């Protein structure tokens, strides 16, 4: 079984529609700040023509769990992706008001999974792996050292087989190597298929889809 694709940081309906047309399993909109930041109203517009069988992901940072749940309900999100200060208690609090999936984000420094990763894996419905870059929450385009962290990820899966979402510096050119090293369940791309922040390059989106399909056949 190959990796599913999530196109994230969407800011235009035309890009979300194209993502759906080429087989994306997930589409993501950002509520965590930065140049791709959306409001509930703008996100609803971005996602308006995405078929409901495609999972809608909202990316959040340090908003209250009440605000996250309100936005998630308002635009009918299927998944909440939690950056920032996240612990088991925060995930549990969000579950009181949100019935979809919750993906805590793990930011690996030098390829090392941080303390508490296993607990977050058990509390959430998947783990999103991103590179640690000081002063940012993610979306930096910095790649993880995939081969270096493969043993730690195998050990984690041996203790708890959660869904692994791989982000961080993926491109059409390198995603095959990332899949070969880590066998993620989902690959998550934003800046690697853009003309400029938030504006997707459809040719690169298609190239990414094709590279993931090819790599999935080989693994």
Image (cartoon, grey):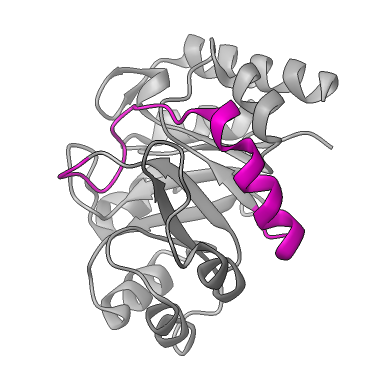
Q: Is residue 61 magenta?
A: no
In the depicted structure, whether residue 92 falls above or below residue 132: below
**As displayed, is residue 209 above or below residue 136?**
above
- Number of numbered discs on residues: 0
Q: What percent of the width, then of the height, locates residue 17?
A: 51, 33
Task: Please tell me in which quadrant of the rendered image residue 22 appears.
Answer: top right
Q: Residue at x 82, y 25 (%)?
A: 219
Q: Is residue 23 visible?
A: no
Instruction: From this view, report whether residue 20 is shown above or below residue 114.
Output: above
Q: Is residue 32 above or below residue 2?
A: below
Q: Which part of the image, by quadrant, shows the N terminus?
A: top right
**Spot occupied by residue 102 in the image (x, y as percentages of width and height):** 51, 67
Residue 60 picture quarter: bottom left
User: Which residue does the image show at 42% across and 29% down from the upper left?
Assistant: 14
In the orientation shown, which residue stands out farthest toward the bottom? 96
At which x and y percent is residue 184? 66, 40
Q: Nearer the viewer, residue 24 or 176?
A: 176
Residue located at (44% from left, 46% from top)? 28
Q: Position of residue 196 (x, y in %)?
A: 25, 19
- Nearer to me, 92 or 42: 92
Q: Is residue 153 magenta?
A: yes
Location of residue 176 (image quadrant)? top right
Compared across the picture, whether 40 is left or right of 99 comes to: left
Q: Which residues are magenta?
A: 134-163
Observer-nearest residue: 170 or 204? 170
| Residue pictured at 23% horizontal, 70% vertical | 63
Q: Is residue 145 visible?
A: yes
**Position of residue 186 in the picture relative to residue 71 (left or right):** right
Q: In the picture provided, is 99 more to the left or to the right than 58?
A: right
**43 or 197, nearer to the observer:** 197
């Amino acid at each position: 079984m190959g990796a599913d694709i999530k196109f994230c940081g969407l800011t235009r309906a035309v890009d979300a529609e194209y993502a759906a047309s080429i087989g994306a399993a997930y589409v993501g909109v950002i509520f965590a700040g930065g140049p791709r930041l959306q409001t509930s109203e703008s996100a609803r517009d971005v996602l308006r023509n995405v078929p409901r069988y495609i999972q809608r992901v909202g990316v959040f940072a340090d908003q209250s769990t009440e605000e996250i749940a309100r936005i998630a309900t308002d635009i009918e999100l299927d998944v909440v992706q939690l950056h920032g200060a996240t612990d088991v208690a925060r995930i549990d609090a969000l579950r009181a008001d949100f019935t979809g999936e919750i993906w805590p984000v793990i930011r690996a420094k030098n390829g090392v999974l941080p303390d508490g990763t296993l607990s977050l894996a058990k509390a959430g419905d998947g783990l999103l792996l991103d590179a640690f870059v000081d002063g940012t929450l993610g979306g930096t385009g910095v790649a993880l050292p995939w081969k270096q962290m493969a043993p730690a990820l195998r050990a984690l899966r041996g203790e708890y087989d959660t869904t692994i979402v791989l982000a961080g510096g993926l491109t059409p050119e390198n995603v095959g190597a990332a899949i070969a090293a880590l066998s993620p369940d989902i690959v998550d791309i934003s800046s690697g298929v853009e003309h400029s922040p938030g504006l997707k390059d459809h040719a690169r989106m298609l190239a990414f889809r094709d590279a993931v399909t090819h790599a999935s056949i080989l693994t």
